[in-house]
Image (tube, rainbow, N blue to C red):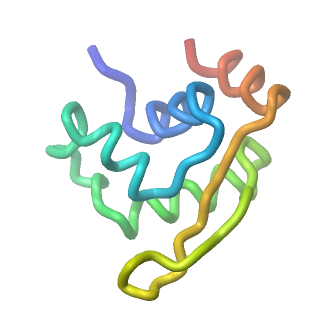
Amino acid sequence: MSRPLNFEMLKYFTKVDEASVDEVMDALKANYSHHRAFNKKSMVEALMTAEKNGLIAESRFDLDPKGEVRVYYSADNGQKRQINSYIK
């Protein structure tokens, strides 16, 4: 059985230095594209919630090719330990 989408999103940040929502979606699409919340708006909200709860942090931002702001998030070692203690 697979983990809930939000859990898998958090676990992804324990494996990468940083990622934007687009990169998270690319990484998880094979297993989660059928999930109702697998859309950019819902996933941005989930990442913002995780950031507000201290599980990840905004690391930088830039403009995507369409000129929209693209936010990158990362998890430091302490945040990775915290995520891994919650989600096995």
Residue at 71 percent of width and 64 percent of height: 60
Q: Quadrant of residue 27?
A: top left
Left or right: 2 with respect to 22? Answer: left
Task: Looking at this view, name the residue that lies furthest to the bottom.
Answer: 67
Q: Quadrant of the C terminus?
A: top right
Task: Looking at this view, name the residue that lies furthest to the left.
Answer: 34
Residue at 60 percent of width and 74 percent of height: 62
Q: Position of residue 29 (x, y in %)?
A: 24, 42
Q: Quadrant of the N terminus?
A: top left
Left or right: 44 with respect to 30? Answer: right
Residue at 54 percent of width and 28 percent of height: 11
The foreground one among 2 and 18 is 18
Q: Quadrant of residue 78?
A: top right
The foreground one among 63 and 42 is 63
Q: Quadrant of residue 79?
A: top right
Q: Is 52 located above or below residue 78 in the figure? A: below
Residue at 62 percent of width and 45 percent of height: 18
Q: Position of residue 6 (x, y in %)?
A: 46, 41
Task: Looking at this view, name the residue that lies furthest to the right.
Answer: 78
Numbered-mark total = 0
